[in-house]
Image (tube, helix red, strand yellow):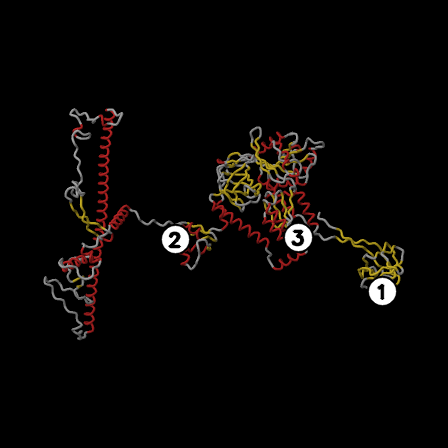
Amino acid sequence: MSDTDGKKPLGLGGAPRSGSVKQSFSHGRTHAVVVETKRKRVVVPTPGKPGSASATGAGGTPNLGDPSKRPAGITDAEMERRLSALRAAKAREQEDAAKRAEEERAREEDRMRRREEIEAKEREDRAREAALRAKLEEEERVRAEAAAEAAARAEQCKADILGTQRRKPASAEPAEPAPAADGAAPAPRSARPVPAGMDERGPASAKPGLPTPRKTDREREERERNAKAKGDEGRRSGKLTLSSALDGEGGRTRSLAAMKRKQEKARNKALGFGQKAEKQVRDVQLPETIVVSELANRMAERAADVVKTLMKMGMMVTMNQAIDADTAELVIEEFGHKAVRVSDADVEQAIETVKDAESDLVSRPPIVTIMGHVDHGKTSLLDAIRKANVVSGEAGGITQHIGAYQVKTEKGQVLTFLDTPGHAAFTSMRARGANVTDIVVLVVAADDAVMPQTVEAIAHAKAAKVPMIVAINKMDKHGADATKVRTDLLQHEVVVEAMSGDVQDVKVSAKTGMGLDNLLEAIALQAEILELKANPNRSAAGAVIEAKLDVGRGPVATVLVQNGTLRKGDIFVVGEQWGKVRALINSKGETILEAGPSVPVEVLGLSGTPSAGDTLNVVETEAQAREIADYRIKAAKDKRAAAGAATTLEQLMAKAKADQDVAELPVLVKADVQGSAEAIVQALEKVGNEEVRVRVLSSGVGAITDTDVSLAEASKCPIIGFNVRANSSARNSAHQKGVEIRYYSIIYDLVDDIKKAASGLLKAEIRETFIGYAQIKEVFKVTGVGMVAGCLVTEGVARRSAGVRLLRDNVVIHEGTLKTLKRFKDEVKEVISGQECGMAFERYEDIRQGDVIEIFEREEVQRTLD
């Protein structure tokens, strides 16, 4: 049995064909590889099979093949459709291939055309440079010849003028050039020696009248001469290097990547790409100080480049450090921009103050403020209009917050009402309500007439220059007298229509609902006369009516939109705070997306609690809002520092001396809303006199926290909580540290308790009560006792514990106490009028006969603040 076992050995069929493939690597390296190639198999169609030439019948009908070999369920028509679709697909493929080849050919022609244009342009540039170089060389040669001729003529003239016979040595004379063969003029003498192998115009081998070969051409010719001299015979000898090996392989060639980079560069150059953009000059706004990163942002430059420039100027700063305006201006000029100086106050210009056009104004609902004395029925009247019950929710039945509501009447009119407190402590709230309102409704109780806060409300309305409507309330009560109210108003220059004036007055009853329709009609009439309009299509502006710190929602501000439309997502600045509108809640507790003019809303999304009365303005960006808020904080801080600082040392010492005699009661106030905190602080500042005063260390809104407890402990003062409570951590901390926390819900009780506490700091009043007089009849000297006066009690009674004064000729010469009081030889506590006794003074013996002793008692009386 053979090894092959009748089988053919494995291998390539047919005779193998060898070939050579040259591989190219980077840096010009190549390598030749011997490979074997296999002939591609050509498939010849056989007759009778589908797809062959014989598959189609003589009649032109396609041969559909053997039906037994078809898939199940395929009919002749279906088979014919499939074959037609196959042929159409092959035809489309051929068309697509031809189209792609045509497009590739067009792109290749375009590339070749661009490459030829680039090469032609390069050839033109080289020719232009060569012509310019030749021209410069020719001009240099002409200048040299002219200089030589001028020098020769000058020497000749000098010799002729001097008339000397001396000649220069032969060695110094320049050799005369040999005459040219063609009879041309001899070349002028050169002023400088010419190197060997070179003439004045270049190498000696250069022919006259022909341009000098380029350096690259000379180097190429030199390499060719060296290659010929070396010859092809002989083996390499010596050390084999990469350069010598490449020289034998036909020279160093460029890599494929280098060729691609060159083509790409040429293509971009032809298309105009890659050109450096022209630098844009910017106007950079420059405040007093600016952070380096912000300066780079305004110049549209890299922050690293700005820092590098500052370091070159000798300032080692980082991008987060601030620099002054002068240095920043130098940096701006260094980068080629223009600096525009602005002051810190210019940030307020971001707030839009453009006056609205008359065509943009539309009618808006009137803003009506309810004002009057405490307990005259303001909130009850508004509840009757709103058909709500707010009074029951107020502590003590009195309003201690300013409320904003929007009411729609039965006739479809929309009215915005502001309810202000009537208590004397809420003066600022009433003033704010009068400043943002259009109409003031002055509520006066018919059974109480004009009271102090009524007069104050009249003053606020006159100061704000807003029209007034008098609502005479409680007309349902027995003893109501509207005439008395009208008469009392005359004393304050308020003349109602019933008294032939121009102020409307309406009789109403919040309890029975009497006259409410007449009041609403009067308000609508007054609003129609005022022609109230606003532009809703602009950035919103409004006034903060109230502000508070909510535990779950954070800082919340009640804002009355006065102009424009406030939308969710707007960025705004209000006083020293800024924020982005996170939510808008109307007076019914519903979340809305926007609020137009005269609409009161609660705004969520502030950075802090603003002050009541601040103005809200919408700005474009957060950067502007933050910048404006920072400027306002800085300005307020500077103002407080300037107000609290003593100008001279004498003033500082005088203030310290004055405060030394004044007792202070420090307190820390936390309230539920900003307006209440402000009212409490103002009320407490009025408590006291020249001997004692209340000092509010801190006031704020929100719950009492550990920070408040720590401050109270350090200052040794109580914490006053108005409609707020301390959290559990603060309560435990206060209990451990012994800090007193007092809670109040009515401002009356708060002010009364603080008055009592401040009264305890007052010094007790010493009152003297005269209880008797005694006259000295005789003076005795008693051993061990001293001088003793024998006296007769002429009036009242003489007591041992009482104080005495010694009067001589009705002049007090001594005041002190008694050492002893005796009747006969017994020590007694008191001696009544008409009896005799013996008295001795404590540490005083200058007594004489005829002196009068005044006997009195001192009593301490505790004082209170009015």
Q: Secondary structure at mark 1?
A: strand
Q: In this rendering, is residue 311 above or below 167?
A: above
Cα–Cα span, label 1 and label 3: 48 Å
Cα–Cα span, label 1 and label 2: 105 Å
Provide residue 426's location: percent of width, then percent of height. Answer: 63, 42
Task: Name the residue beneath numbered marker 1.
Answer: 787
Residue 529 seen in render: no
Q: Is residue 789 left or right of residue 474?
A: right
Task: Name the residue beneath numbered marker 3.
Answer: 664
Locate residue 851: give its quadrant.
Answer: bottom right
Q: Secondary structure at mark 2?
A: loop
Q: In this rendering, is residue 307 above or below 35?
A: below
What type is the residue that disc 3 sits on? Answer: Glu
Asked if labels 2 and 3 touch by Cβ distance under 8 angstroms, the answer is no
Residue 330 seen in render: yes
Return the disc, 1 or 2, that comes first in the chain's sequence: 2
Provide residue 566's location: percent of width, then percent of height. Answer: 50, 38
Task: Name the residue beneath numbered marker 2.
Answer: 336
Q: Residue at x 53, y 49 (%)?
A: 633
Q: Residue 574: give its label.
A: none
Between disc 1 and disc 2, the foreground one is: 1
Return the disc, 3 or 2, that comes first in the chain's sequence: 2
Q: Secondary structure at mark 3?
A: strand
What type is the residue that disc 2 sits on? Answer: Gly
What type is the residue that disc 1 sits on? Answer: Met
